Image (spheres, rainbow, N blue to C red):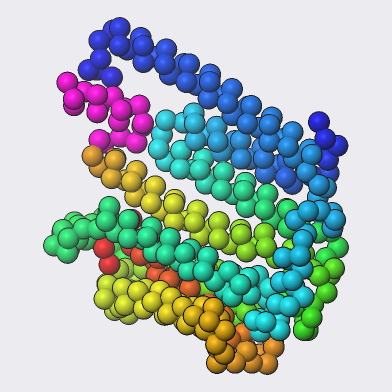
Amino acid sequence: MNRLNDGERGIFRRFQAGYGAIGLLVSGALAAVLLLTVSYLPGFGQADRPTENEVSQRYIAKGLEETGATNVVAAVILDYRAFDTLGESAVLFAALAAVILLLREEPAALARRMAERKPFEPDQGPILRITARVLIPWLLLFGAYLVLNGHLSPGGGFSGGAVTGAAMILHNLAFGPEQTRRFLSERIFFRLLVGALCFYGLAKGYVFFTGGNHLPGSIPLGQAGSIFSGGLIGPLNIAVGIVTACAVYGIFALFDRGGW
Amino acid sequence: MGENLLRNYLEAGAVVIFSVGFSTLLLQSNLIKKIIGFNIMDTAVFLFLAAKGYIAGRRAPILTGPGGDPAQYINPIPSALVLTGIVISVSVTAFALALALRLYERYGSLDLNEILLSREGEKT
């Protein structure tokens, strides 16, 4: 602000006032147009609307026998549209890579930063530590349940991975990064992340290759409703869960201190 | 004006929340508030999609036996789309926050106007 002369400052003020007014106008117009559109949409909860077409009916009618998963949403995202989910995991990975590019510190700078921080952040107190000690096993158990049961009940790799990642963040906050590094060092972290993504790509590539060439894919679908069913959906859920947990924890660690 | 505005109260609410997020994105000059506005827009889209997938009196699409009857379950596709959207929203938010952090380290401010003005100053 100080670098501008009086004339420039006046232009800037007028621009800001105009920008605010036009911005309000545009937002109001957008709200009006969207509300008008909503008033023409088919009614809420109505069964006979154009989105209830043969696609969703087919997913529900044939989903169980074609994929072996009782959770139709899991069948859609990890079988019928598994390529989308691979892209989605890749977007998560790309976001993590971008955050690493922007925030990663060199190991020496990281050590210096941690040494500087130590006196201001003493061990985080008994309340957090005891709560974390009670809570973390249950969080990990719940995350594993969501991931492993994803093809049978609501849940799946993304939600279970987010819960597991939250447990690791809590561990990190309560006991400090040194303790978390004992079981999740940078090396293990990247091996897990890249290994899970590669496994997803290879497994799904196998299915696409055999399916696209009309070869018999030899992955049994299993007894519907049991834990070992759904063909590849269970293993893919685990891979997605690992990617999500690693990305959530990695983004936290990078924002917290710029490294592992 | 159609006749379904009051019946579609969830969609109408989602649209209003979307506009609130959009105006936050446009009018706030603080970058963190812009990112918050972006997240509000995301949330509104999820609410809209979830409302669009619902069908009154039907159950969640967890089948109990082979050959499910499509007349008994809600539409599973919007649920799958919301799942995709949440992940993308988390990714974009993390990326935007990292960029904001870098900008703050570079210019000492999160206010977009101040950042723009200090860049103008550098050129001259």
Predominant SS along the magenta part: helix
Give how far across and how far down residue A129 sits, in percent: 41, 70
What quarter of the picture does the C terminus of chain A occupy?
bottom left
Q: Is residue B101 left or right of residue B26?
A: left
Residue occupying image coordinates x 79% and y 81%: B67
Q: Where is A208 relative to A48, above or below?
A: below
Locate residue A216, reporting x and y percent. 57, 90
Looking at the image, which residue is at 71% across and 81% down?
A64
Judged left or right of residue B71, residue A91 is: left
Quick one: quadrant of the N terminus of chain A? top left
- Determine whether, in the image, residue A132 is placed left or right of residue A231: left
Residue at the image point whose x is 51% and y is 40% from the top: B37
Pick the front one: A36 or A21: A36
The furthest residue to the front = A213
Rendered residue at 36%/68% (across/down): A172
Residue A217 position, x and y percent, is 55, 88
Region of the chain picked out in magenta, as a range: B107-124
Instruction: Tell me where residue B79 appears, x and y as whole percent.
Output: 66, 62
Q: Residue furthest top?
A: A7
Q: Quadrant of residue B23?
A: top right
Q: Residue B105 vs residue A33: left or right?
A: left
Indicate whether B36 appears above or below A226: above
Membership of A55 in magenta stretch: no
